[in-house]
Amino acid sequence: MSTPQDLNIDYVANLARLELTPDEKAQFAAQLGDVLHHIERLAEVDVSGVEPTAHAFPIENVWHADEARPGLSVTDALRNAPAQRESMISVPKVVE
Amino acid sequence: MSAPLHFQSLAELSARLERREVSATELTQAVIARTKALEPRLHAFNSFDEADALAQAAASDARRAAGQARGPLDGIPIGLKDVIAVRDQPLTASSKIIANFISPYDATVTRKLKDAGAVLWGRLSCDEFAMGSSNENSAFGPVANPWDTTRVPGGSSGGSAAALAAGEAIATLGSDTGGSVRQPAALCGVVGLKPTYGLVSRYGLVAYASSLDQIGPFGRTVEDTAILLGAIAGHDELDSTSYNAPVPDYRAALQSGETPKRIGIPKEYFGEGLDTKVAAAVEAAVKFYRDRGCEVKEVSLPHTRYCLDAYYVIATAEASSNLARFDGVRYGHRSKAATDAIDLYAKSRAEGFGAEVKRRIILGTYVLSSGYYDAYYLRAQKVRTLIRRDFLNAFAEVDALLTPTSPVPAFKIGEKADPLAMYLLDIYTIGVNLAGLPAISVPCGFTSTGLPIGLQLIGQPFKEADLLALAHRYEQAHEWSKRTPSL
């Protein structure tokens, strides 16, 4: 099991696409170090041969008929868009 | 003298509406007046729409006049936690990142309440994205506990519990991922139920941790909670984790007189950190059931000490994934300082999310990151299997479990500054979410300073009717639910 010191906050913040201030980095690293220290207790448990649980009551093969139904109108879908043009959401240039 | 309209039970008001002793408009006006008088002190609402509520009430009165009333919820003002979508109304999750969002559609529970004729009233405050145990994580300020306005109402559905306790709504909905309905119900002296995972559709609920989240009802009484649960439960093909089975008549189950007889007391839930006043109140409830002929026995849930650890791995992992959608592109806050696409995500999220949400995203991203997945996430999911097995083993011997809901009564606003100390408050409620079980918090006393105490009953999967009947039996023999805060 890893140690809490492994939490490289810059690396993780970048993965999470979350810009943090120097103060936040220092504060979160200390607080999450405490939390991770607590979580390390999971290593005490003997989990050999135990299947993981993703959902308490797994339901499999949930299908419904492939029928066209009314969805959100363009107006509704764009209603909360921060920027739009010609019925499209506009974003900063992604590729040069 | 009967209680003022805003403090009457849903069941009582429903009967009075039916007898035409009161109209939906009068009732809604009373709730609006109460809300406007108290909100400067409580701040349980993020917003409310008076004209919209009055229009819904007028429509209810018109239906009733035409002989087309739709049942017990028709004309009853019900408040919704601000993580449940109501078309054309704001949906903020108490976060700056979607502070200006307007729902383009109804959640399934919203549609069901509209179909039942309920008057949807207000957007209730909560911890940001339902992450917290005190409602102090709202971007729009804390909520005051109606029993002592210097204290928290609990969380994350603090606004739902406080508004109901104060008479600003007749019943409310919250959501419960690790105790977020039950704990505030306990701290505010109302009833709160977390349904079995899959009983209530999550369609239109802002996702926090999808394998743990359930929408749950708050009521002034167990009967009110049963009525509301009956209205929102049921299969929904828009939620692929929805359970496909008929919904029993929960209200009728209360009158059947058939309550479970075997009650287990998990010894791990009565240890260190439990407030003595809470322990005494819960032990008195244990005595009550024993005196009424129930077979009460101690049981063990040996993996209880790992619930918190498994929860904070699984919940934050799921949250980091769910909250990836808030990136400033399709909706929500978009940073004006961004230079390119990646920078747009990072800055919009930095400006939009509060501290607790950021902490949980960082933790969740870390436990899922390459090299740590097996040690944290996969291991936590295996421990989750063991935790669930503990409960199912206990249910081979007993019908229900009885525990405190929260280890402490309501604490002071600002008192718990350390995140870990706050997380430890959830120790009695999170196991239920990991195991997907139903549980209810019922008022079981008050401290000497007048703060409510809650009792938790945990049931077997999809046996909400049994759980409600057991809680009802206790409630009927006590006066706790009849007390109201003096504001």
Image (tube, grey):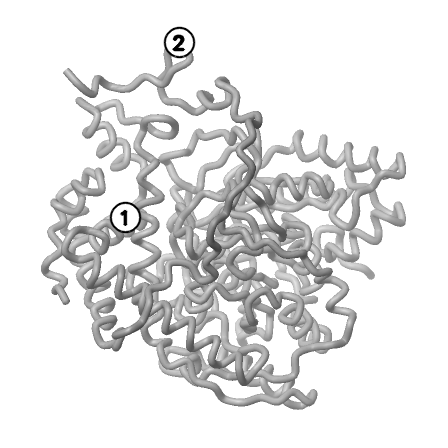
Number of numbered discs visible in the structure rendering: 2
The image shows residue B363 at horizontal and vertical percentages of 24, 54
Disc 2 versus disc 1: distance between alpha carbons? 34 Å
Residues under numbered marks 2 and 1 in contact, where contact means CB atoms less than 8 Å apart: no
In the rendered view, does B343 fall on the left or right side of B53? left
The chain identifier of the residue carrying mark 1 reads B
Q: Which residue is pictured at 36% across the width and 57% down the height?
A: B414
Kindly report which numbered mark, 2 or 1, lies closer to the viewer in this rendering.
2
Relative to B423, residue B400 above or below = below
The image shows residue B342 at horizontal and vertical percentages of 19, 29
Which residue in the protein does label 2 denote?
A: A86
Q: Amino acid at mark 1?
A: Ile
User: Which quadrant would residue A19 be assigned to in this image?
Assistant: top left
The chain identifier of the residue carrying mark 2 reads A
10 Å neighbourhood of mark 2: few (<14), some, or many (≥20)? few
Relative to A18, residue B336 above or below = above
- Residue B43 in view in this figure: no
Which secondary structure, mark 1? helix
In the rendered view, does B457 fall on the left or right side of B141? right
Which residue in the protein does label 1 denote?
A: B361
